[in-house]
Image (cartoon, rainbow, N blue to C red):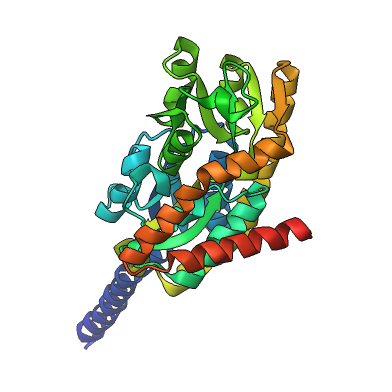
């Protein structure tokens, strides 16, 4: 009888231990699942010290913070993961989960949004950035259907920086000008000879005389140090163009994210629209300060020359409208929206 009781007690204890062990084993994967971090790669062509790369890192950090560490976004600056002109395709194919680059670096790929870059007289980066986001949201272009668009930002008015003074259209004739995308057409309409290259190649090209000028936002003269290898800046903001830059995510990756993580990324991205716009404007202010520090000549166009420059680039705008119309795209409406919004911004 005593032995029977001992066996029963032992069996009961063994059962408790087995059940406890089972409970612990089943609970471990759940705990691990809660702690699993969503890791995302982010390809960006700016160097790590550039203000727009800094803003991108802050964006990633804010998402990590708001998600309680559930999302970790690793930046790959300077085109180390995918080159600037391959960034969008790299996001589509999954080389990177997120990418930032310029629509203009792949001409023809974004037939409607190319209109954002046109020389319409953008006054500053904040205006260009807000217009780009509002119109991307309004038109929902099919050309972005293969990714998740997070937001867009755009630099302040492009100006002409050169190795010799440029005061009139006559001075532009035959000038070898670094330009990309639509700015190549601007250079040609002004009478120059466009030479395509990325910002990263421009410093050496100016230094060696491969090009004699560059169409660029003034911030690049400091941000990319190009002010060191030019002698004058022509304030041509009357035909101020911009370069709209996308921040996009791989569509499958986006759809795989939990709804609350998608909401966090969406909310933070909305906040960063203004932060990028502010950064572009501050960078332009710093660029002008850098130019003055280097004692570079700053040339203001006369009213007559302003009208001449505007007239010179008008065919680009009309060509865009005609090409968009042939594709069944609302290019005319987009341009009308941009001009109206620029006018409103300038009247404030």
| Residue positioned 39% across, 67% down in the render | 141
Can I make out residue 138 in this image? yes
10 or 142, nearer to the observer: 142
Which quarter shows the N terminus? Answer: bottom left
Left/right placement of residue 140 relative to residue 16 reads right
38 or 176, nearer to the observer: 176
Write down the quadrant of residue 147 in the picture: bottom left
Q: Position of residue 179 (x, y in %)?
A: 45, 33
201 or 57, nearer to the observer: 201
Residue 91 vertical placement versus 172 (above, below): below
| Residue positioned 55% across, 65% down in the render | 336
Q: Position of residue 176 (x, y in %)?
A: 45, 22
Residue 178 vertical placement versus 123 (above, below): above
Residue 6 vertical placement versus 124 (above, below): below
| Residue positioned 45% across, 55% down in the render | 318
Farthest-out residue, bottom: 1
Instruction: Count up the numbered dots.
Output: 0
Q: Position of residue 128 (x, y in %)?
A: 60, 53
Write down the quadrant of residue 209 in the picture: top left
């Amino acid at each position: 009888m005593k032995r029977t009781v001992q066996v029963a007690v032992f069996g009961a204890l063994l059962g408790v231990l087995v059940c406890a062990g089972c409970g612990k084993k089943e609970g471990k994967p759940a705990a691990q699942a809660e702690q699993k971090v969503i890791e995302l790669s982010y390809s960006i062509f700016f160097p790590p010290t550039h203000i727009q790369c800094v803003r991108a890192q802050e964006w990633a950090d804010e998402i990590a913070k708001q998600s309680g560490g559930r999302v970790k976004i690793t930046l790959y600056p300077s085109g180390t993961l995918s080159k600037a002109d391959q960034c969008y395709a790299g996001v589509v194919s999954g080389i990177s989960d997120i990418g930032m680059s310029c629509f203009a670096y792949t001409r023809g790929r974004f037939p409607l949004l190319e209109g954002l870059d046109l020389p319409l007289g953008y006054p500053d980066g904040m205006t260009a950035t807000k217009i780009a986001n509002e119109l991307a949201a309004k038109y929902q272009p099919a050309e972005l259907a293969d990714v998740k668009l997070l937001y867009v930002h755009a630099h302040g008015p492009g100006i002409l920086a050169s190795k010799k003074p440029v005061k009139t259209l006559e001075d532009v004739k035959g000038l070898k000008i670094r330009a990309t995308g639509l700015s190549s057409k601007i250079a040609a309409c002004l009478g120059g000879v466009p030479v395509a290259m990325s910002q990263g190649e421009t410093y050496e090209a100016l230094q060696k005389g491969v090009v004699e000028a560059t169409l660029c936002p003034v911030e690049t003269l400091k941000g990319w140090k190009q002010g060191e290898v030019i002698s004058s800046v022509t304030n041509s903001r009357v035909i101020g163009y911009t370069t709209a830059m996308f921040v996009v995510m791989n569509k499958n990756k986006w759809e795989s994210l939990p709804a609350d993580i998608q909401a966090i990324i969406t909310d933070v991205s909305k906040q960063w629209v203004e932060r990028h716009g502010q950064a572009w404007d501050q960078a332009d202010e710093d660029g002008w300060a850098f130019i003055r520090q280097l004692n570079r000549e700053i040339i203001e166009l006369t009213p007559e020359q302003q009208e001449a420059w505007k007239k010179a680039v008008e065919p680009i705008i009309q060509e865009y409208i005609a090409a968009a119309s042939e594709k069944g795209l609302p290019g005319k409406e987009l341009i009308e929206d941009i001009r109206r919004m620029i006018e409103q911004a300038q009247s404030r």
